[in-house]
Image (spheres, rainbow, N blue to C red):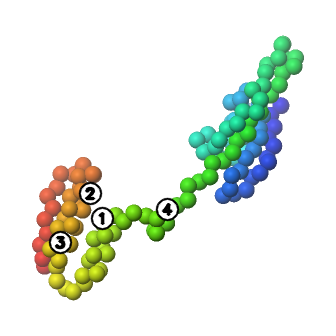
């Protein structure tokens, strides 16, 4: 007899279910179905391994408790490390005098070189005014 005891199912929180099945794998599959998730997103506690009994007499179902792992919180801009692209954009807006800053141009070229290298693209980066 397969059963699922929904202890707590609250969206965006650590939801957990207690489920059973003929085997531990069956119990886990039942719990995953109840939580509508995959095995890599839950912590599994085996409550009872279960047993087949003798000729089916005294058989006991396996029982498990599956608990959803909390989703990592998205990185906020305040926590984010500045990227070279962001730094170049910030520098460009700060030096909005109409003149080109040679250091800014060199840094922009280096950012593009690094990006192309990481993408596996062999390219020549150059800049010109106008």
The residue singled out by tag 1 in the image is 84
Question: How far apart in space, not on screen, are marks 1 and 3 (Cα)?
Answer: 13 Å
* Element under disc 3: helix
In the rendered structure, which disc, 2 or 4, sits on the residue that comes first in sequence? 4
User: How many residues crowd around disc 4 within 10 Å: few (fewer than 14), some, or many (20 or more)?
Assistant: few
In the rendered structure, which disc, 1 or 3, sits on the residue that comes first in sequence? 1
Residue displayed at 33% across by 69% down: 86
Residue 22 in sight here: no
Where 63 falls versus 84 (above or below)?
Answer: above
Where 33 falls versus 12 (above or below)?
Answer: above
Residue 51 in sight here: yes
The residue singled out by tag 2 in the image is 115
Quarter assignment of residue 129: bottom left
In the rendered structure, which disc, 2 or 3, sits on the residue that comes first in sequence? 3
The residue singled out by tag 4 in the image is 75
Q: Is residue 43 left or right of residue 48?
A: left
User: How many residues crowd around disc 3 within 10 Å: few (fewer than 14), some, or many (20 or more)?
Assistant: few
Q: In the rendered view of the protein, which quadrant contains the C terminus? A: bottom left
Q: Nearer the viewer, residue 15 or 55?
A: 15
* Element under disc 4: loop
Q: Residue furthest top?
A: 55
**Which of the two marks, 2 or 4, is nearer to us in this view?**
4
**Which of the two marks, 2 or 1, is nearer to us in this view?**
1
The residue singled out by tag 3 in the image is 103
Residue displayed at 20% across by 72% down: 104
Question: Where does residue 33 sit, x and y in percent of width and height?
Answer: 70, 42
Per the rendering, the mark at residue 1 is none
Q: In the rendered view of the protein, which quadrant contains the N terminus? A: top right
């Amino acid at each position: 007899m397969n059963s699922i005891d929904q202890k707590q199912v609250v969206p965006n929180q650590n939801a957990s279910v207690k489920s059973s099945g003929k085997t531990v794998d069956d119990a886990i599959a039942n719990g995953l179905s109840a939580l509508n998730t995959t095995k890599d997103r839950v912590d599994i506690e085996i409550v009872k391994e279960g047993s087949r009994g003798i000729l089916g007499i005294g058989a006991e179902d396996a029982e498990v408790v599956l608990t959803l792992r909390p989703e990592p919180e998205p990185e906020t801009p305040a926590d984010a490390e500045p990227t070279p692209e962001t730094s170049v954009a910030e520098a460009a807006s700060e030096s909005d005098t109409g003149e080109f800053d040679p250091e800014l141009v060199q840094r922009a070229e280096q950012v593009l070189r690094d990006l192309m290298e990481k993408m596996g693209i062999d390219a020549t980066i150059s800049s010109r005014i106008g």
